[in-house]
């Protein structure tokens, strides 16, 4: 029995065909189905689940013949899909550009902040960010460490 499959895009994949015709229930099953059952595409064996099926392709699955046909308004739908794809590409480029600008601004702000804290450290003679104990310029006066803990008895 021959069955015509109407598509509204330029092509569909073999997995999509198998799912659409309820031969398999999920895309993950396509790999195993194609290993176990022969599928003929235009008279030749086909086992690639991502194989693109175009207008007038003939697929034989489990004794059933499927012929891919474009729907009547497929040209309009394909053109609309192409325009939408181009619009998404433009939006993606804009997003990438905006993200790059944000990253550059953040880097400049970080440099300014680090410079401001370095100036505070220099001005106040402190160790970190203008806060904390002042630098003592070497060793502190007075005993340090375990040997000095018992020296004041």
Image: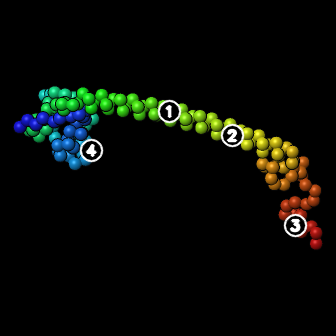
Q: Position of residue 98 (x, y in %)?
A: 55, 35
**Residue to which mark 3 is pinned:** 149
**Residue to which mark 4 is pinned:** 27
> Which numbered disc flags the more N-terminal residue, 1 or 2?
1
Cα distance, mark 1 to mark 3? 66 Å
> Which residue is outermost to the bottom?
153
Neighbourhood count class around disc 4 (C-alpha, 10 Å): few under 14, some 14–19, many 20 upward: few
- Please tell me in which quadrant of the rendered image residue 86 appears: top left
Q: Is residue 108 left or right of residue 151?
A: left
Q: Nearer the viewer, mark 1 or mark 4?
A: 1
Q: Position of residue 110 (x, y in %)?
A: 69, 41
- Please tell me in which quadrant of the rendered image residue 150 appears: bottom right
Q: Are marks 3 and 4 in contact (CB under 8 Å)?
A: no
Cα distance, mark 2 to mark 4? 48 Å
Say which residue appears at 50% left-offset and 32% top-offset. 94
Label annotation for residue 94 = 1
Cα distance, mark 3 to mark 2? 47 Å
Vertical arrangement, residue 127 with respect to residue 106, above or below: below
Q: Nearer the viewer, residue 4 or 76?
A: 76
SS for callout 3: loop
SS for callout 4: loop
Query: From the image, which quarter does the N terminus lie in?
Result: top left
Q: Nearer the viewer, mark 2 or mark 4?
A: 2
Vertical arrangement, residue 30 with respect to residue 84, above or below: below
Q: Is residue 60 left or right of residue 121?
A: left
Q: Are marks 1 and 3 in contact (CB under 8 Å)?
A: no
Q: Position of residue 105 (x, y in %)?
A: 64, 37
Say which residue appears at 18% left-offset and 30% top-offset. 72
> Which numbered disc flags the more N-terminal residue, 3 or 2?
2
**Residue to which mark 2 is pinned:** 109
């Amino acid at each position: 029995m021959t069955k015509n499959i109407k598509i509204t895009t330029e092509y569909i994949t073999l997995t999509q065909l198998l799912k659409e015709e309820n031969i398999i229930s999920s895309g993950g099953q396509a790999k195993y189905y194609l290993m176990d059952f022969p599928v003929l595409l235009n008279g030749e064996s086909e086992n690639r689940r991502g194989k693109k099926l175009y207008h007038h392709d003939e697929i034989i699955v489990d004794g059933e013949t499927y012929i891919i046909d474009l729907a009547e308004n497929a040209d309009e739908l394909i053109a609309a899909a192409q325009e939408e794809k181009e619009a998404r590409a433009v939006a993606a480029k804009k997003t990438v550009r905006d993200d790059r600008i944000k990253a550059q601004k953040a880097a400049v702000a970080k440099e300014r902040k680090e410079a401001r804290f370095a100036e505070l450290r220099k001005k106040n003679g402190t160790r970190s960010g203008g806060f904390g104990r002042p630098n003592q310029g070497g060793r502190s006066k007075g005993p340090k460490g375990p040997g000095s803990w018992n020296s004041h008895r």
